[in-house]
Amino acid sequence: MKGISMKAADATITLDVGEVDKLAEATQAIRESGAPDDPYYGTPSPESFEEDDGSKASFLPADDLESMAEGLIEAHPEVFSALNGAKINYLWKRTGGKAGGHAVFGKAVALPEIAKYLADMDRDTFAIWLAADNCQDYALTADQVKACLAHQLMHIFYDPDKDQYKLTGHDFEGFGTEVRLFGAWNGDLRMVGRQMSFLDKVPVEEKPEDGGA
């Protein structure tokens, strides 16, 4: 499953798109479930990462994110049904850092082969982490945490030819200025333009001001 990433002058807006028409409907349904304006209180505090010896852990198990992901997969089979057999570990990361000058809110990663061997894990084992510091610093709402988690889930897809789960990137990466100056000048941009009309349903002020998933 793939998606769209567009960088504007001061922000990175990233949306993943599989079957785009269905995803547009599912995105709106995700927003309408729960209370989108409420802050997400499940983000662990910096103190939660402190170890008994004074050191700081890099990751914490995230049972709340796992439950949220299971709810997304169950509620939106048109988008996530292929993930029912995937082995995914959910984590909170103490610091997310930045990429390209923008805050990183989360990431989906494939575990290295040696880690799978040492932990006796299946070959199709992934980890999804969300950055506790950036989620707190940018005051992400419960809805935004859910959207970020959904974004990471869309990076994992099933390849039936190889009977294997894999990571995938975005359908499109470009600049907002490029679109403003030259319009939909290629096939990818024309596809983006046709499929992003549903964005007017998502108030811009409810998105993080800096960063992307």
Image (cartoon, rainbow, N blue to C red):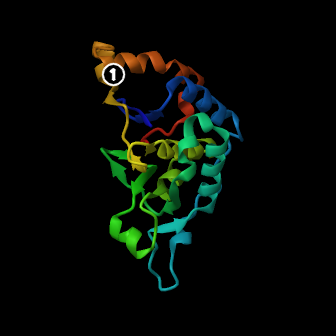
Question: Is disc 1 placed on a helix, strand or loop?
Answer: helix
Query: Which part of the image, by quadrant, shows the C terminus?
Result: top left
Q: Position of residue 159 (x, y in %)?
A: 41, 43
**Count of numbered badges drawn on the protein:** 1
**Relative to 119, is 30 above or below?**
above
Could one spot residue 203 in this view of the protein?
no
Q: Position of residue 160 (x, y in %)?
A: 43, 43
Hey, what amino acid is under mark 1?
Answer: Asp
Residue at the (54%, 47%) spot, across then down: 83
**Relative to 33, is 93 above or below?**
below
Q: Residue furthest bottom?
A: 53
Residue at the (39%, 19%) spot, across then down: 191
Q: Along the line of sight, which residue is nearer the eye, 41 or 126?
A: 126
Query: For residue 33, which quarter of the picture?
Result: top right
Q: Which residue is mark 1?
A: 188
Could one spot residue 53 in this view of the protein?
yes
Q: Residue furthest right?
A: 34
Query: For residue 72, which quarter of the picture?
Result: top right
Residue at the (51%, 71%) spot, across then down: 49
**Relative to 63, is 202 above or below?**
above
Query: Which part of the image, by quadrant, shows the N terminus?
Result: top left
Q: Position of residue 3 (x, y in %)?
A: 42, 33
Q: Position of residue 139 (x, y in %)?
A: 56, 48
Residues packed near mark 1 inside 10 Å, few (<14), some (14 to 19) or many (20 plus): some
